[in-house]
Image: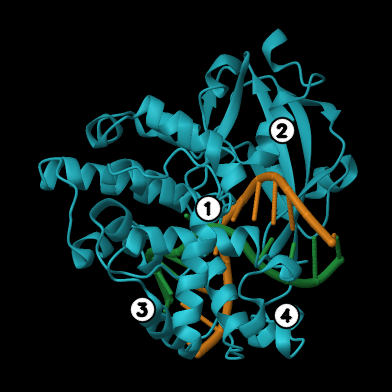
Chain colours: A cyan, B orange, C green
Amino acid sequence: MKNEKFFLTSLLSWHLNENSREMPWKGEKDPYKIWVSEIILQQTRVQQGLAYYNRFVHQFPNVKTLATASEQKVYKLWEGLGYYSRCKNLIRTAKFIHEELDGHFPEEYEDILALKGVGNYTASAIASFAFNQPYAVLDGNVFRVLSRFFGIEIPVNTTQGKKYYTALAQTLLDKKNPALYNQAIMDFGAVICKPALPECLQCPLQKKCIAFLKNKVSILPVNNAVNKQKKRFFNYLVVEYNETFYINKRIEKDIWENLYEFILIEANSLLNEKDLLKNEEFVSLLKGINFKVKLFSEKTSQKLTHQLITAKFIRIEIEKPLHTVKYFSAKPNELKSLPFPKLIASYLAEKNVPLSSI
DNA sequence: AAGGCGGGGTG
DNA sequence: CACCCAGCCTT
């Protein structure tokens, strides 16, 4: 039997017989819900996305409810999930479908692909799951399974690699049942052909798996080297005046676009009180204003993919308002409805930050 | 073609 | 600690 045929029949029979994963969007035919689930699951583990998916489809059961919701509410629901441009595109696309397509979700692959936030993978997933069209998905699971079984050593994070794997995945696809096949290969990658410590000893593909036979399981798939981490230091001024706090919305092309934060002084290090009094930004911000530094929080940090953020929060009381238009003020209970990055949400959740007791 | 974008799990 | 996860967009 040819390897391709063996691959397909073994995979499908594994999926049929074994315990594939249980997920609320499995077998779902509503393209809207499939779309929401796939956006949430981009670069996100099923386990982590599950609760978010349930909250989303409960609050926004269809395109219209999502398209007409307040954007801040949608962002708040996304809080903590990361990659916030996904949320921006989710909103944009919902409005587009609601307003331009009369609420009708596109059904052709090319039209699905054209939606903001929808790339190759997501378009294939929606086309196959919702409309049973013959498009093979290509995600981290599929790369890994194909790389190992066929012994492919082309780096997966290159243009050449993506082209090669796309073509291979498409030829392997069971055109008669693309939804089932796509589901099967991703489940297989997640349950058996895992990144670390895969279950080769109980793998039904073992006897024809090149990686297993040549002892290359641990080196496949090949990834080209990526950049290393940069360190950044965020000094947050939690400035309080008249029972309100100054808040900034991040709009630059940087981390946390569209989320909120306190007044940020980014520097080459964390600043102590003496540093602060010499800091240009700080001095110009508080020029002519009496203030009292009330509390320095412990330093805290957050690891992102390519940067390590170390932060501290400095609580400051001022005696008259800031003369800048860059920030706006919010009362403690208003802070609750704003979307913050994890780092700040954690700070606000601490018991020793008595924002609400003021 | 390369770089940037979160947060969390895992060995 | 490094690696990776149901990827996508911009430059």
Q: Residue at the spot x=54%, y=79% of the render?
A: A146
Residue A248: x and y in percent read 54, 38
Q: Which SS class for mark 1?
A: loop
Q: Which SS class for mark 4?
A: helix
Quadrant location, the C terminus of chain A: top right
CA gap between label 3 and label 2 equals 44 Å
Q: Are marks 3 and 2 in contact (CB under 8 Å)?
A: no
Dot label at residue A21: none
Question: Badge 3 sits on which subunit?
Answer: A
The answer as to whether the residues below labels 3 and 2 share one chain is yes
CA gap between label 3 and label 1 equals 28 Å
Residue, disc 1? A83
Q: Are marks 3 and 1 in contact (CB under 8 Å)?
A: no
Residue A94: x and y in percent read 26, 43
- Ranked by sequence position, the earlier of labels 4 and 1 is 1
Are there few (<14), some (14-19), or many (20+) residues within 10 Å of tag 1? some
